[in-house]
Image (cartoon, helix red, strand yellow):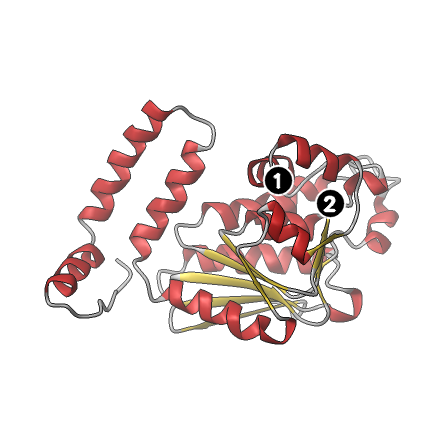
């Protein structure tokens, strides 16, 4: 992978690190391709049971690199990056059958905010901040934000944040329901890693079912959700991890999951 994004797998955890700290992890084409390929590799690797998405430096990701973007504005299709890069990145995060943790160390704006929202769990430094940013540069939303943000904060608050972009502190984001775990900045790296490693050691098939069930139920009624739960529970119930969990419970021992 290109050094604009670092990729490492250890003990079932893939760590994907945005690595353009001098540019506040703004996304140029090289970084977008590397991020897409890293996430797709993690999704396809059976040895990976959880993913930690984080960043180097003082920012998580400020979104599109506008210095690169401005050079393409005279072309026939200046926003083709949405189809080629941003959509596949979000699909990789949301579609992989394993949990994705975002360790948000600093400002997350535009697509960077969208990627954090696409993750299954957000561990956020108390010095971090969020900004939808798109309307500020006369753009509509991308990176899934039109879908994820209203579901987390409600349609009215989402409209306010999208139409009137502003900096949202980590504390306010926690109050809005964007943050799962708010931690002191000095503890962010260790806490995000601990959360991700806990998930990597957990019942992977069950996590995949929970993730799929929540996504499926977001746009459907109760009857359909119940049918999907039946399907997914049947899958989890035949997993090796379920057998391990039941046997460990009866023996009053801690289960040692194998991820299948």
Question: Circle 1 sits on which residue?
Answer: 149
CB atoms at circles 1 and 2 under 8 Å apart? yes
Query: Tag 2 or tag 1, which sits nearer the N-term?
Result: 2
User: Residue 178: in sight, yes or no?
Assistant: yes
Question: Circle 2 sits on which residue?
Answer: 132
Mark 2 crowd level (few <14, some 14–19, many ≥20, 10 Å Cα): many
Q: Position of residue 162 (x, y in %)?
A: 74, 37
Query: Left or right: where does residue 130 sit relative to residue 98?
Result: right
* SS type, badge 1: helix
Query: Left or right: where does residue 110 sit relative to residue 69?
Result: left
- For the residues labelled 1 and 2, the Cα–Cα distance comes to 10 Å
Instruction: Give the residue at x 48% y 59%.
Output: 41
Q: Quadrant of the C terminus?
A: bottom left
User: Residue 8: in sight, yes or no?
Assistant: no
Q: Position of residue 8 (x, y in %)?
A: 50, 72
Depicted 141 relative to depicted 219: above or below:
below
Instruction: Give the residue at x 67% y 57%.
Output: 170
Instruction: Give the residue at x 48% y 56%.
Output: 100
């Amino acid at each position: 992978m290109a050094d604009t994004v670092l990729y490492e797998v250890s003990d079932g955890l893939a760590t994907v690190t945005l690595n353009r700290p001098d540019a506040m992890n703004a996304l140029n084409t090289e970084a977008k391709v590397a991020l897409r390929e890293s996430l797709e590799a993690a999704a396809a690797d059976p040895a990976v049971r959880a993913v930690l998405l984080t960043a180097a430096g003082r920012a998580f990701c400020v979104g599109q690199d506008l210095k690169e973007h401005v050079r393409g504005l005279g072309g026939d299709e200046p926003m083709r990056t949405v189809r080629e890069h941003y959509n596949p990145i979000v699909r990789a995060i949301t579609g992989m059958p394993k949990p994705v943790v975002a360790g948000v160390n600093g400002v997350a704006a535009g697509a960077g905010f969208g990627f954090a929202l696409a993750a299954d769990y957000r561990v956020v430094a108390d010095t971090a901040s969020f900004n939808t940013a798109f309307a500020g540069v006369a753009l509509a939303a991308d990176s899934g934000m039109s879908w994820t943000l209203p579901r987390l904060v409600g349609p009215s608050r989402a409209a306010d944040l999208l139409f009137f972009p502003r900096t949202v502190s980590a504390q306010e984001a926690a109050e809005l329901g964007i943050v799962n775990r708010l931690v002191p900045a000095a503890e962010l790296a260790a806490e995000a890693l601990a959360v991700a490693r806990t998930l990597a050691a957990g019942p992977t098939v069950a996590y995949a079912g929970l993730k799929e069930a929540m996504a499926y139920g977001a746009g459907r009624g109760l009857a359909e959700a119940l049918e999907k739960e039946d399907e997914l529970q049947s899958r989890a119930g035949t997993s090796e991890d379920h057998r391990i969990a039941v046997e460990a419970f009866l023996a009053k021992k801690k289960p040692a999951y194998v991820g299948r």
